[in-house]
Structure formats: C-alpha cells, structure tokens
Amino acid sequence: MIVPDGYSDVPNGKIAAIVTHLEMTTRPARRDDPPGAWTLRKVDAPALPWYRDLFRRVGEGWLWFSRARMTDAELAAIIHAPGIEVYALVLDGRDEGLLELDFRERGQCELTYFGVTAGLIGTGAARFLMNRALERAWSHDVRRVWVHTCTLDHPSAVAFYQRSGFRPFRRQIEVADDPRLDGTAPRDAAKHVPIIE
C-alpha cells in the first residue's frame, strides 16, 4: 500500500515511525577508534534474562519493543539460532551496549540491533561499537551489510549510519501498538513520543 500525500491519522493507542533502511555493498575504509576503555565481548547462547535486561537498558528510551513482547521460546529461537551473533560492549566490567548480527541470509549481514546505554551516548562508544560491528560483518563472506532505524530512535542515528558508510535505500512507515500502554515499556519511556490514548 502506498500512503497518500498529506496527513494520515494514526489511531489512538498506536505509535507511528518512519523507518529508513540503509546498506553498504563494499567494505568501507576503517575509521579510527575514539579514545575510551570499551571492549567487546561475544555472548554465545545469551541467557534470556541477560539479553532482556540489556535490550531494555539500551532500547527502552527509543521504544524498542519487538523483542520485549516475545515469549521466551520466540526470543530463544532467534538469539540462539545458527547465524546469529550477539555481542556486548563492556565498560568497567558492565555490559553497556548491544550488537546483534544476523548472517542467516547467505551473502548478507543485518545489524539487527545496535546501540549503547544512555550514559554512553556522545562518548564515542557507539563509534567503537560500529567499528567492531563492521569488522565482524565483513570478516564473513558477505556482499551486503544493512541496518534499519526509525524516527523513534536517536535523532542522529541516520547521520551516524551514513558517516559509517551506509547508504539509504528504502523508507517505510511502521504503525504499532504503543508499548507503554500494555506494560511492555514504562509509561515514562521515550518522552519525545507523546502517548495518545
């Protein structure tokens, strides 16, 4: 369906976002790491409580809700699947960033989830994490690395991905139930997105 020009109503109780898909089809030049004491830790067969906690701490402020709504069986089927790699960005012994790479489609890597906790935004931690993400992605036999972000995310997300070498190729509108209304996220999450009941 093509959305018509002009305004389209979003029903009460829903949220709407413009989703931008970005890709790279050649390995970009490596960018220097910013100064910082971060490390990257691969997490094999992540424990579900650990994953849910980090997913919440990284994404709740941006209304990441898809994995939070999954049952344990649904979540485990994805994050424990062959071809999925999960990493934590570590600072001072604490996991403060999430990187999830999906290699299940031959010749491709999707940066399924990428982000750092609120206290690390603007510190260079995301640049460090992206450098590691691209190293891991391109260490496989891939022809394409892609990611998507949306207008609920950090306002600099699209520009950050473009500086990292990604090019936008598709735009969509996503409408979903507001996760703050069913308890998936706290009511005070994502203050930049008003609740309309």
Image (cartoon, rainbow, N blue to C red):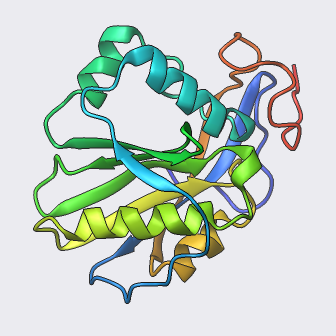
Number of disc labels:
0
User: Which corner quadrant holds the C terminus?
Assistant: top right
Q: Quadrant of residue 23?
A: bottom left
Vertical position of residue 185 compared to residue 150: above or below: above
Task: Report whether residue 174 is seen.
Answer: yes
Q: Is residue 65 left or right of residue 123?
A: left
Q: Residue at x 38, y 44 (%)?
A: 87
The correct choice, above or below, for 129 with respect to 87 in the image is: below
Q: What residue lies at 60% left-to-right and 44% top-to-bottom?
A: 92
User: Percent x, y for residue 75?
Assistant: 36, 20
Q: Quadrant of residue 88?
A: top left
Q: Residue at x 65, y 32 (%)?
A: 57
Where residue 70 sits in the image (x, y, percent)? Answer: 44, 16
The x and y percentages for residue 145 are 31, 67
Residue 138 x/y as whole percent: 23, 71
Q: Is residue 65 among the parts visible in the rendering? A: no
